Amino acid sequence: MTSTNKKIDTDHLELAIELGREELAEYVKLTEDALIQEVNIDGFRPGKAPREKVRQHVGEAQVLESALQTAVQRSLDKIIAEQKLDVIEATDLAVKENTPDKLVYTVKLQIFPEVKLPDLASIKVGRHEVVVETKEVDEALETIKASRAVLTDTAEPAVKGDKLEVDFEVKENGALIEGGESVNHPVVIGKENFIPGFEDQLIGLKKDDCKEFSLTAPKDFANKTVAGKKLDFVVTVKDVKKVTLPELTDDFAKTLGKFENLDQLMLNIRDGLTEEKKEKENQRLRLEIMNALIDKAECKPSLAMVDEQLTAMMQNFDHDLHQHDMELSLYLAKIDKTQEDLKKEWRPEAERQVKMALVLHAIARDNKIEITREETDQALESLIQSAMLRDGGATPNLDLERMRTSIQSRLLNEKTFQLLEKNCLPE
């Protein structure tokens, strides 16, 4: 077997590989050996059928086609390993000659850019103590109580704590602001989820009452388009309900699960909040480690890689908009921007994400971190079982190869981050 490399650009090269008669004959034999084990032929035990019978059963064309695939895959893998090529993907396979005496083919390889990593021991980040305050447990309990609240219709004027449904319009200088109209909108007076003063204006109103009033949005209001401006409201009350919250007793705790008393419930809540905070702290630590690595590593992603990441980011954003019944074109029209404007704004983040992926890959490669087939299969099986439970036991229609690739990437990143934590966190 011989091969030649031709550099196309900084990230791509064309690899030409030639196999001779003896090598091709060996691949044909390997293919036939595999088919002998796989094919069932009447009159012969599994794996015992003669080679000639298997060729007749499968067909000469199929044998040669399978042998060609094996020859290409194994020879390509061998050349990549021998030349220590760090390949992202192989594309544009072209068979130039295919006879019993010679197989010649070319393939385009995308190569990982060179990454010069800093000494991992030079990266040190500090872990923050995870503390759950009593106030946080109390707030979680209040949320649980609210989810078990009893709602009762009332004709009485609304007071603090009542739950209302309202229709409202919000205008500025006579023009409806963006998102300033809603129907049957839920409001709990006292939750302070609206512009300051809005809920106070609802106190004393009854079902079917209508009220007009004006408020000035705070200068630091989240919606910057109306911050500091005078807004005019028209509110119609569609429904008023009294909210009766359950008492925090041992009996209440028992209704929520396998809790014998309120103390066990509170302990469970504290444990849950602690785990949640630990997960957030781990995410913060990993991000801080990666930011430090990116700053110190020498890595220059190609324009094509950054453009590819930008395209993926745009597709994900479009998908998120669809989840909220919005169209990308309409969103862009509202903010008076084009896709190219967004890509220009997002380019620094896209470059950072590509650098992160390249640095993680280089660390995994240099430290020989790998994911076994068994690890991937186990995670894939768990994912399929979860999908079947979600779909009532039916076998879901899944792209298994795409899932397998995604799982391998996720598991590899997890192992790599575990290595980084071991090296970059204090004992």
Image: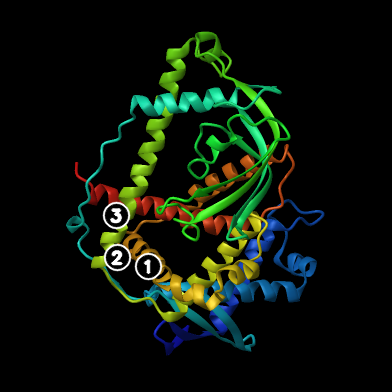
- Give how far apart the Cα atoms at labels 3 and 2 are: 10 Å
Q: Position of residue 72 (x, y in %)?
A: 56, 76
What is the crowding at mark 3: few (fewer than 14 residues within 10 Å), some, or many (at least 20)?
A: some
In the image, what residue type sits under mark 1? Arg
Residue 117 is labelled as: none
**SS of the residue at dot 3?**
helix
Residue 418 appears in view: no
As displayed, is residue 338 above or below residue 48?
Answer: below
Earlier residue among tags 1 and 3: 3
Q: Quadrant of the C terminus?
A: top left
User: Label 2 is placed on what type of residue?
Assistant: Ile
- Residue density around tag 2, few if under 14, some if 14–19, many if 20 or more, within 10 Å: many
**Label 1 residue SS:** helix
The residue located at (57%, 48%) in the rendering is: 380
Residue beneath disc 2: 294
Left or right of 10, for residue 242: right
Tell me the CA gap for discs 1 and 3. 13 Å
Task: Please say if the residues under marks 1 and 2 sit with CB atoms less than 8 Å apart.
Answer: yes
**141 or 185, which is in the foreground?**
185
Label 1 sits on residue: 352
What residue lies at 58% left-to-right and 26% top-to-bottom? 159
Secondary structure of the residue carrying numbered label 2:
helix
Identify the residue position indicated by label 3 in the image: 288
